[in-house]
């Protein structure tokens, strides 16, 4: 055969392979789109024990024609909390069985197309064009979603077998090639090399079904591939497909998802070792002498793949727990993180046997919540001096703890109301209940600061030196007022609570000054519009955080003061106008501490 003819054959082979792979993809997509929700429900509900998991995994894989797709879907359901690792083990075993259906379909190539038998209609030469005609009619001319999905399945089926036909024609010349026969003879004497070849080619192809299909095509076309080449290569193909699964399970997933990938690898490796030992012993002791050197066709390959995966699943099914333990040893749990705020998880309803104890614990937890909000505020303000992704993750984790506590405390405090009997405790409980959302909002402002810092960082922008100095002073004042609030709540100290309002008034004055000054900078073009808008947003959020602290102080003071309880705003107005010496002294000290230095910034 000339070089030109070899090139043409190679192009035909690659074109057929491309059609085969695309046909598989198209057929799988049609099946998944037509039954996606049902498949998820089946995986979620029919895997309560390992045996049912095996059956379910086999069924789903047989439908969507891809063990990798089944395992990817399983990993997604693990991440969503619908499945656990025990259920996933069964699905993995079943997926290996279900993927053999593709090979059983491909064996239709061996049906004799000659004669008047009805079986001739199932030969790909007839079935592929028929499937393409039906598919294109359903896909293009019917228009309904169901019809489109069925059309995709038919088109995929037809393209797949058309690709197989092209590959068959391309490799037909190999049956007369002495070189090819010598290669096959070499692999027949080297089963481990044959298995390794199956691993490598499957990793390259990223599809065990495609590799088995190519092997079936070569076997049917050349009539020279013997069984002692087929069986180790099938085992290698099964190991090779684990690489794709392992990659999918390791990227951006949780521990159980990664363990699912480990189970798939261990399952196939153990199955391969068992079969390789068994087949070697059978051959060595002379069992089935006519089998080893016999020429394999497409049907033999399909049958051996099915037997291999089915027997492996049956043998290893009782050891599902062992596979889980191996996976857990390979992918270990992270060491438990130190819980900075254990009090946020201390609202146990068992405490309600003593309402006073339950109420006291709620107050302590509220104080810790405020302390956590302060810590998060400090972290988020530090982001403007150098944005750090690790710090951002810490901020997000703390915010999640604050949100979870706010949710848990709602049901706890509402239920606690029915156990509280005296007016004093009732007012305390009412105060705690109203303070929780106020503290939660302070925590929300901390995440707002982080988001604004990230916005500047991503845009490559920074505040001017003077703006950063202003932000440092105002941020320091806000950090102190949140700290006072946390201390007042933790110690249940009304004297500390009275120190909050003078500082809040100074913060209001600071914000007014900075808004005027920054508007002037914007008019003069000293800073950009983007940084200017971000700075203005910061001023708004900082002021609102201080306002929440003022509201919490009023709630604390109002527990034992009817005038404050009836009208917070009137109380504050009278306080500002009364000339109270302690209030004015605190106001003067805070003005000197924060407002005067702010005025001196140029």
Image (tube, rainbow, N blue to C red):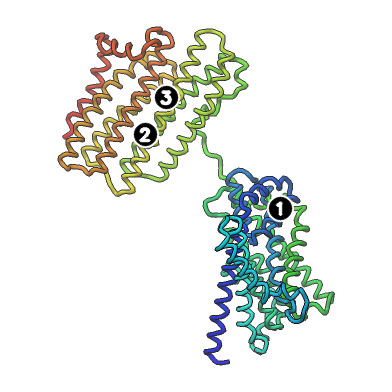
Callout 3 crowding tier (Cα within 10 Å): few <14, some 14–19, many ≥20: some
Which residue is at the front of the view, 489 or 50? Answer: 50
Specify the label residue 56 is tagged with.
Answer: 1
Residue 404 placed where, x, y %? 51, 32
The residues tagged by marks 1 and 2 sit, at their Cα atoms, a distance apart of 51 Å
Q: Secondary structure at mark 2?
A: helix
Residue at (56% x, 69% y) in the render: 204
Closer to viewer: mark 1 or mark 2: 1
Label 2 packing within 10 angstroms: few (<14), some (14-19), many (20+):
some
Q: Earlier in the sequence, mark 1 or mark 2?
A: 1
- Tell whether 294 sits left or right of 79: right
Q: Could you say whether the residue bearing mark 1 is in a helix, strand or loop?
A: helix
Q: Nearer the viewer, residue 126 or 537?
A: 126
Q: Which of pointers 2 and 3 indicates the residue nearer the eye?
A: 3
Disc tally is 3
Residue 493 in which image quadrant: top left
Identified at 38% across, 32% down, the residue is: 445
Q: Residue 264: x percent and y percent? A: 65, 57
The earlier-in-sequence mark between 1 and 3 is: 1
Distance in Å between CA atoms under marks 2 and 3: 18 Å
Q: Vertical placement of 72 versus 456: above or below?
A: below
Say which residue label 3 marks. 438
Query: Where residue 531 sits in the image (x, y, percent)?
Result: 26, 42
Q: Quadrant of the N terminus?
A: bottom right
Q: Locate the C terminus by quadrant.
A: top left
* Mark-to-mark CA distance, 1 and 3: 49 Å
- Say which residue appears at 74% left-offset and 81% top-offset: 114
Q: Tell me, for residue 378, which label it has, or none.
A: 2
């Amino acid at each position: 055969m000339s070089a030109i003819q070899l090139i043409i054959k190679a192009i035909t082979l690659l074109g057929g392979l491309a059609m085969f792979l695309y046909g598989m993809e198209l057929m799988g997509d049609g099946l998944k789109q037509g039954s996606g929700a049902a498949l998820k429900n089946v995986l979620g509900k029919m895997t309560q024990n390992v045996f049912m998991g095996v059956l379910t995994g086999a069924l789903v894989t047989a439908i969507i024609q891809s063990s990798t797709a089944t395992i990817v879907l399983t990993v997604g359901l693990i991440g969503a909390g619908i499945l656990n690792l025990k259920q996933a083990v069964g699905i993995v075993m079943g997926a290996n069985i279900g993927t053999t259906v593709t090979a059983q379909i491909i064996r239709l190539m061996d049906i004799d197309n000659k004669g008047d038998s009805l079986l001739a209609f199932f030969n790909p030469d007839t079935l592929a064009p028929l499937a393409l005609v039906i598919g294109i009619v359903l896909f293009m001319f019917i228009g309904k979603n169901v019809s489109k999905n069925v059309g995709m399945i038919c088109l995929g089926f037809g393209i797949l077998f058309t690709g197989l036909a092209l590959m068959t024609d391309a490799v037909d010349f190999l049956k007369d090639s002495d070189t090819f026969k010598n290669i096959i003879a070499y692999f027949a004497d080297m089963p481990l090399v044959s298995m390794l070849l199956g691993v490598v080619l499957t990793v390259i192809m990223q599809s065990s079904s495609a590799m088995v299909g190519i092997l079936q095509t070569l076997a049917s076309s050349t009539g020279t591939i013997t069984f002692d080449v087929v069986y180790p290569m099938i085992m290698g193909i099964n190991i090779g497909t684990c690489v794709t699964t392992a990659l999918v399970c390791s990227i951006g997933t949780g521990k159980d998802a990664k363990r699912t990938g480990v189970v798939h690898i261990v399952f196939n490796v153990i199955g391969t070792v068992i079969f390789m030992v068994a087949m070697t012993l059978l051959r060595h002791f002379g069992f089935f002498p006519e089998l080893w050197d016999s020429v394999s066709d497409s049907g033999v390959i399909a049958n051996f793949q099915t037997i291999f995966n089915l027997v492996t699943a049956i043998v290893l099914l009782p050891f599902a727990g062992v596979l889980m333990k191996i996976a857990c040893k390979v992918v270990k749990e992270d060491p438990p993180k130190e819980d900075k705020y254990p009090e946020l998880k201390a609202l146990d309803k068992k405490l309600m046997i003593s309402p006073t104890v339950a109420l006291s614990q709620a107050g302590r937890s509220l104080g810790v919540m405020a302390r956590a909000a302060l810590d998060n505020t400090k972290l988020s303000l530090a982001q403007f001096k150098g944005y750090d992704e690790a710090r951002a993750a810490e901020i997000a984790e703390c915010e999640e703890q604050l949100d979870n506590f706010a949710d848990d405390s709602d049901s706890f405090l509402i239920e606690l109301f029915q156990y509280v009997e005296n007016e004093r405790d009732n007012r305390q409980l009412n105060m705690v209940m109203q303070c929780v959302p106020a503290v939660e909002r302070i925590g929300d402002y901390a995440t707002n600061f982080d988001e604004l810092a990230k916005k500047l960082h991503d845009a490559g922008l920074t505040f001017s030196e003077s703006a950063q100095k202003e932000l440092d002073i105002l941020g320091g004042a806000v950090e102190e007022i949140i700290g006072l609030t946390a201390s007042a709540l933790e110690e249940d100290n009304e004297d500390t609570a009275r120190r909050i309002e003078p500082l809040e008034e100074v913060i209001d004055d600071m914000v007014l000054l900075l808004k005027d000054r920054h508007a002037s900078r914007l008019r003069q073009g000293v800073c950009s519009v983007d940084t200017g808008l971000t700075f203005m947003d910061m001023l708004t959020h900082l002021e609102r955080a201080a306002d929440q602290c003022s509201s919490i102080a009023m709630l604390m003071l109002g527990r034992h003061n009817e005038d404050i309880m009836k009208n917070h705003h009137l109380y504050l107005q009278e306080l500002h106008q009364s000339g109270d010496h302690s209030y004015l002294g605190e106001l003067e000290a805070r003005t000197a501490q924060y407002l005067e230095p702010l005025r001196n910034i140029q």
